[in-house]
Amino acid sequence: MNLDRNDHFWKNFPGLVWSNADASDSVMIMAALNRPRLEQLEAIATEFGFDRVLAEWEVLQEEGLKPIHLEIANEILDEIAGRMSHASGRHRSTLAGSRSPA
């Protein structure tokens, strides 16, 4: 069993990493970033913190993703940053800093 995995949360996203049912949170977050969907990434940012999502995104960008992929994911992350900065209480605390352009 992987102790760095929030099994309860990831049950909401079956098949995200279908080849490894015990993948760590980092692997799961990166998989979501590889196939960016607003609602899914927003839920992940709420659960793990927007800074954590951005940290995993930094790692992925170093791997030479296609420009269109970078553009789509950056647009989604910008939208999430905007939504979270306007959210109240608990959600606002997950956004430690402003998002800088990649």
Image (spheres, rainbow, N blue to C red):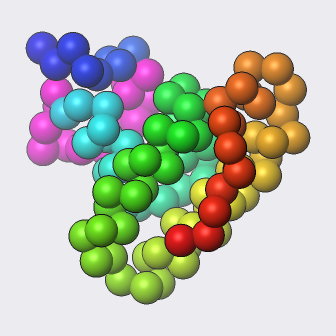
The residue nearer to you, when weighing 66 against 40, is: 66
Looking at the image, is 68 positioned above or below residue 98?
below
Residue shown at the point (68%, 44%) measured from the top left: 97
42 relative to 4 in the view: left or right: right
Q: Is residue 15 magenta?
A: yes
Q: How many marks?
A: 0
Q: Quadrant of residue 96?
A: top right
Say which residue appears at 23% left-offset and 31% top-offset.
24
Give the dominant element type of the magenta stretch: helix, strand or loop: loop
Left or right of residue 52, residue 16 in this image: left
Residues in magenta?
9-22
Q: Quadrant of residue 13?
A: top left
Seen as rendered, the residue at the extreme bottom is: 67
In this view, the residue in front, 80 or 51, is: 51
Please state if 52 lies on the left or on the right of 10 as rendered.
Answer: right
In the image, is 75 to the left or to the right of 32?
right
Vertically, is 44 above or below 1? below
From this viewpoint, is residue 40 visible? Answer: no
> What percent of the width, then of the height, locates residue 65?
33, 76
73 and 101: which is toward the camera: 101
In the image, 35 versus 63, the foreground residue is 63
Residue 55: image location, x then y, percent: 43, 47
Q: Position of residue 31 (x, y in %)?
A: 32, 51
Give the quarter of the figure containing the N terminus.
top left
The image shows residue 68, relative to residue 91, as above or below, that is: below
Q: Specify whether residue 94 is in view.
A: yes
Residue 5 on the magenta span: no
Tell me which residue sits at (50%, 29%) in the image.
48
Determine the residue positioned at 30% across, 68% down: 62
